[in-house]
Amino acid sequence: MKCPYCGNVETRVIDSRYSEDMEAIRRRRECLNCGKRFTTYERVEIAPIIVIKKNGEKQEFIPEKVKKGMLKACEKRPISEEDIDIAVQEIERELRNRDSIEVPSVEIGEMVMEKLRKMDKVAYIRFASVYREFADVETFEKEIRNLIKEKYGGI
Ligand SMILES: [Zn+2]
């Protein structure tokens, strides 16, 4: 790390600590040439996840947006905000572990539905009905029937 005062590259770390949010390491350095001190920060660099919308537009993945949609679907349902946060984190982690950093928005929607399906059937139906834009009552009924079948093993 080049000294900002004299340009010398040899420095000594005199103190190392985490930043308050634990997302960076703050290092206090001393230049071995001029003796002046300066601070450097070290943080993880991660590429953003890119969401490809239905119309081909690209946007950065924003976990808050996913959370908002899930919160809305879970309104007045016995699901805590913490549960939703965990689900959103899992989705983000799953996306990060993919080979590609670009993901179609449809797939994210499917992932959200999969989570909600396990968490709360009502929230799932709410989300799916908005998300999949159930073309007609028939498709909607079919989806509900599938859910009931899953739960009771057939009607
Ligand atoms: Zn220096």
Image (cartoon, rainbow, N blue to C red):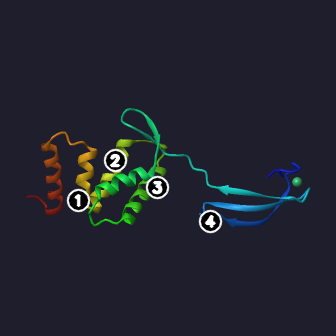
In this rendering, the label closer to the viewer, 2 or 4: 4
Of 83 and 95, nearer the camera is: 83
Name the residue that disc number 4 marks. 20
**Distance of label 3 from label 1 (alpha carbons):** 24 Å
Element type at marker 4?
loop
- Give the residue at x 38% y 59%: 87
Evaluate if marks 1 and 2 touch, with contact meaning CB atoms under 8 Å apart. Answer: no
Q: Which mark is residue 93?
A: 3
Of marks 2 and 3, which one's residue comes earlier in the chain?
Answer: 3
Name the residue that disc number 2 marks. 109
Evaluate if marks 3 and 4 touch, with contact meaning CB atoms under 8 Å apart. Answer: no
Q: Residue furthest left?
A: 155
- Give the residue at x 37% y 32%: 55
Element type at marker 2?
helix
Q: Which mark is residue 49?
A: none
Of 29 and 107, nearer the camera is: 29
Label 3 within 8 A of ligand 1 by Cβ: no
Name the residue that disc number 1 marks. 121
Of marks 3 and 4, which one's residue comes earlier in the chain?
Answer: 4
Q: Which amino acid type corresponds to the residue marked 3 in the rendered image?
A: Arg
Considering the image in quadrants, where does the C terminus appear? bottom left
- The crowding category of the residue bearing disc 2, from other C-alpha atoms within 10 Å (few below 14, some 14 to 19, many at least 20), is some
Evaluate if marks 2 and 3 touch, with contact meaning CB atoms under 8 Å apart. Answer: no
Question: Where residue 35 sits in the image (x, y, percent)?
Answer: 89, 60
User: Quarter of the image holding residue 29?
Assistant: bottom right
Q: Which amino acid type corresponds to the residue marked 2 in the rendered image?
A: Gly
Q: Which amino acid type corresponds to the residue marked 1 in the rendered image?
A: Lys
